[in-house]
Amino acid sequence: MKAKTPEQSKTTMTDMVLPSETNPLNNLFGGELLARMDRAASIAARRHSRRIVVTASVNHVAFNRAVPLGSVVTVEAKVSRAFNTSMEIYIDVWMEDRESGERTKANEAIYTFVAVDSTGKPVKVPEVLPETKIEKERFDAALRRKQLSLLLAGKIKPNEAKELKALFD
Ligand SMILES: CC(C)(COP(=O)(O)OP(=O)(O)OC[C@H]1O[C@@H](n2cnc3c(N)ncnc32)[C@H](O)[C@@H]1OP(=O)(O)O)[C@@H](O)C(=O)NCCC(=O)NCCS
């Protein structure tokens, strides 16, 4: 199984914020952004694995900036690391200024997807070969995030999360 770079799974989705997608403050509704990020992450995971993929976990979401009605929003998803059957997807969300066209980082999120066969059984995925500095940083930290996610889900014990524990020693 040939390793792939994060660039090979890169998925970019650009769309506007419509009135039906906003909260009472006329900003993008959080659930709408979660759905857009899930869709982009799902395509990135599929491009990396060329398999059916399912969302296993939403590991982190930071709604740092409100996204006003009418904004042009770009969701960019890349597989940051693959393990055995699971993949971490890192998602960056950008807003585009109408006049200057300048992009501002609005939010980010990290999802875990699992590749499965037609019966839903997890199957092996290719490794990730990070290239840029940020891709390498995200690759390195992904193991700790996987351990934290499994710990919070009650799927591993604290003494099994060695790399995560090392952060606090
Ligand atoms: C995701 C799913 C396939 C995992 O099945 P499972 O029986 O737990 O399988 P495993 O224990 O072998 O785990 C498979 C992989 O997922 C990872 N995983 C499972 N739960 C996880 C979690 N909460 N956080 C991070 N990784 C997780 C495991 O570590 C394993 O990774 P690895 O093979 O790369 O080491 C299964 O739980 C499922 O189908 N869930 C429903 C998915 C779905 O419908 N999503 C949409 C929600 S509406």
Image (cartoon, rainbow, N blue to C red):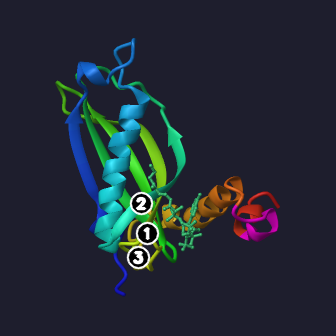
Residue positioned 35% across, 25% down in the render: 28
| Image marks 2 and 1: residues in contact by CB distance under 8 Å | yes
The answer for how far apart the CA atoms under marks 2 and 1 are is: 9 Å
Q: Distance between the Cα atoms at labels 3 and 2?
A: 22 Å
Closer-to-camera residue (29/91) = 29
Residue type at numbered disc 3: Leu
Residue under label 3? 129
> On the rendered structure, is 2 left or right of 65?
left
Q: Residues within 10 Å of mark 1 (few under 14, many from 20)?
A: few
Asked whether, in this view, residue 112 is left or right of residue 1, the answer is right
Q: Position of residue 15 (x, y in %)?
A: 21, 36
- What's the CA distance linking mark 1 and mark 3? 27 Å
Ligand 1 is in which quadrant of the figure? Answer: bottom right
**2 or 1: mark nearer the eye:** 1
What residue lies at 40% left-to-right and 79% top-to-bottom?
A: 126
**Which residue bears the numbered disc 1?**
120
Please report whichever mark, 2 or 1, sits nearer to the chain's N-terminal start: 2
Viewport quadrant of the C terminus: bottom right
Asked if the residue at label 2 sits under 8 Å from ligand 1, the reply is yes
* Rendered view: 71 above or below 144: above
**First reached walking from the N terminus: tag 3 or tag 2:** 2
Identify residue type, mark 1.
Gly
Q: Earlier in the sequence, mark 1 or mark 3?
A: 1
**Which-is-in-front pick, marks 3 and 2?**
2
Labelled pair 1, 3 in contact (Cβ < 8 Å):
no
Residue range highlighted in magenta: 155-162
Q: Is mark 1 within 8 Å of ligand 1?
A: yes
- Which quadrant of the view contains residue 17? top left
